[in-house]
Image: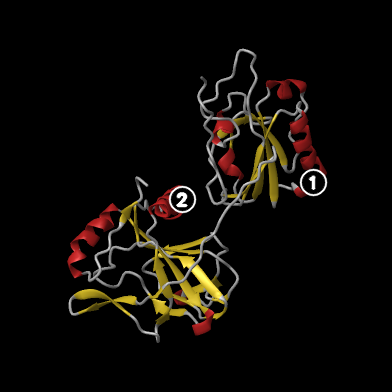
Amino acid sequence: MSAALEYIRLGAGDPAPWFTARGCSNPEYRFDTAAGRYIVLGFFASANSAGGQEALAIVRENRQLFDDNHLTFFGVSVDPGDEKRGVLKTELPGIRWFWDTDLAVSRLYGSVARNFTPGADGRISARRVWYVLDPTMRIMKTINMDGNPNHGAEEAQGGQESGFMRDVGGKTVGIVDYGLKRRSDVVLTDETLLGELRARMKKRLVPEIEKVHFFHATRIERFIVACYDGANGGFFRPHRDHTTKGTAHRRFAVTINLNNDFEGGELNFPEYGPRTFKPPPGGAVVFSCALLHAVTPVTKGKRYAFLPFLYDEAAAKIRAENQQFLEDKSLSVNISTG
């Protein structure tokens, strides 16, 4: 009995894997150098197949969109015959092709199974899957050109009134003061959900933080979903996230919005001007815990957000030393093995 085919699965929010591949005009094209514009990366298997021809017809019909400034198309062929027939040629601006005859790129993106081995007849089992990437080379959308839809789900809920941390009598304690903050939180405890959150943050967020800030996060503090409710003008006045003994280890704060059907509730950094930030659902704002920041009052609807803190092993030692000052000794979670 043959082994079941195992495919790498990539979805919205995942960083697009980097690779070097042979192209029509460049024998060693570094894909990551194409960042800075939107990209359609299309795995069509073979231009000589009916499915491949149908997929490539879509590119031809929308040729005017691929201008290399806003949008670029890269097509990936696994058929050596496409190159021999000369049917695919670089068309600048905007259209380029990769010859992936060793299947390395197709395996990397889940078009070909990781454990697939071509038979004696040379036939290749490939899925026609296309990806839309943003300018930072994160996957915005996955399109299965063979017709199987992708589905997703969101979760949002409120919870218990939350406060903020303050050192009182030698202990770091939670304080509720409606003059400084109005928000309710729910602590996530489902192990399956927590495992998924750890995996996604490790895969999608940690590499980006390392690239931008040269900081390798290995630990998460708190798994909460917060609700800023327009009914009571939910807000959080300017504050920093590392100013107590029990929070001194925190290095980066993460704000991931779970919805966008609200008004107000935007993040801002008063030290650097009045601009506010409202990431789209699933989008993250990551910032140093040393930065002064605030959340403007929600004026309509409810804002739900996932709000963890990240730190590393050096900071974990600081946290361990300061456990004696914590009134609430909730455990952190190591995400390096998540």
Up-down relation of residue 278 to residue 133 (above or below)? below
Name the amino acid type tagged 2: Arg
Q: CA distance from mark 2 to mark 1?
A: 33 Å
Residue 60 rendering spot, x and y as whole percentages: 80, 40
> Which numbered disc covers residue 38?
none
Secondary element at image label 2: helix
- Depth order, front residue of 262/310: 262
Secondary element at image label 1: loop
Residue at the extreme bottom of the image, as rendered:
179
* Whether residue 89 is visible: no
For disc 1, the marked residue is: 62
For disc 2, the marked residue is: 200
Up-down relation of residue 144 to residue 231 (above or below)? above
Give the quarter of the image for residue 174: bottom left
Give the quarter of the image for residue 224: bottom left
* Whether residue 121 is visible: yes
Q: Residue at 37% of width from left, 75% of height from top?
A: 162
